[in-house]
Amino acid sequence: MPVLVDTNILLRLLQPHDPHCRMAEDALKSLRGGNQVLNVAPQNIVEFWVVMTRPIHENGLGLTIEQAVSELEAVKRFFDLLPEISVLERC
């Protein structure tokens, strides 16, 4: 069964000292072990980028552009990226 991974899960994985990091890792490991297909949507990518590159003092992670690009490449390797579908295509 396909699973859409929430952006907060992606963000927790980048924060090893966050108390929820281990829980996020365990959840993904369990889903993978159950042969679930883990997906991210274009919206996840946008949200992930915004938080990664936002300054720490503004509730972001303060990553550089280069670091954020590297993290996005890892996400695309680990998860299946769903296609962008316009509103018109849905109707």
Image (cartoon, grey):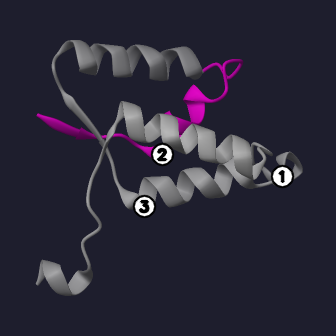
Q: Which of marks 2 and 1 is nearer the N terminus?
A: 2
Vertical relation: 14 (above or below) 75: above
Q: Is residue 33 left or right of residue 43?
A: left
> Quadrant location of the C terminus?
bottom left
Circle 2 packing at 10 Å, graded few (<14), some (14-19), many (20+), is some
Q: Residue 43 carries which label?
A: 3
Cβ atoms at labels 2 and 1 below 8 Å apart: no
The alpha-carbon separation of the residues under discs 3 and 1 comes to 20 Å
Of 32 and 66, nearer the camera is 66
Q: In this view, does 35 lie to the left or right of 6?
A: left
For mark 2, what is the residue? 7
Cβ atoms at labels 3 and 1 below 8 Å apart: no
Q: Is residue 50 left or right of residue 89?
A: right
Give the residue type at disc 3: Gln
The alpha-carbon separation of the residues under discs 2 and 1 comes to 18 Å
Looking at the image, which residue is at 52% across and 60% down? Answer: 46
Mark 3 residue element: helix
Q: Quadrant of residue 83?
A: bottom left
Give the residue type at disc 2: Thr
For mark 1, what is the residue? 55
Residue 54 image position (x, y, % from top left): 76, 55
Residue 55 image position (x, y, % from top left): 83, 52
Residue 80 image position (x, y, % from top left): 29, 41
The magenta stretch spans residue 83: no
Mark 1 residue element: loop
Give the residues drawn in magenta, as a range: 1-19
Cβ atoms at labels 3 and 2 below 8 Å apart: yes
The alpha-carbon separation of the residues under discs 3 and 2 comes to 9 Å
Q: Earlier in the sequence, mark 3 or mark 2?
A: 2
Looking at the image, which residue is at 36% across and 22% down? Answer: 28
Looking at the image, which residue is at 39% across and 34% down? Answer: 77
Mark 2 residue element: helix
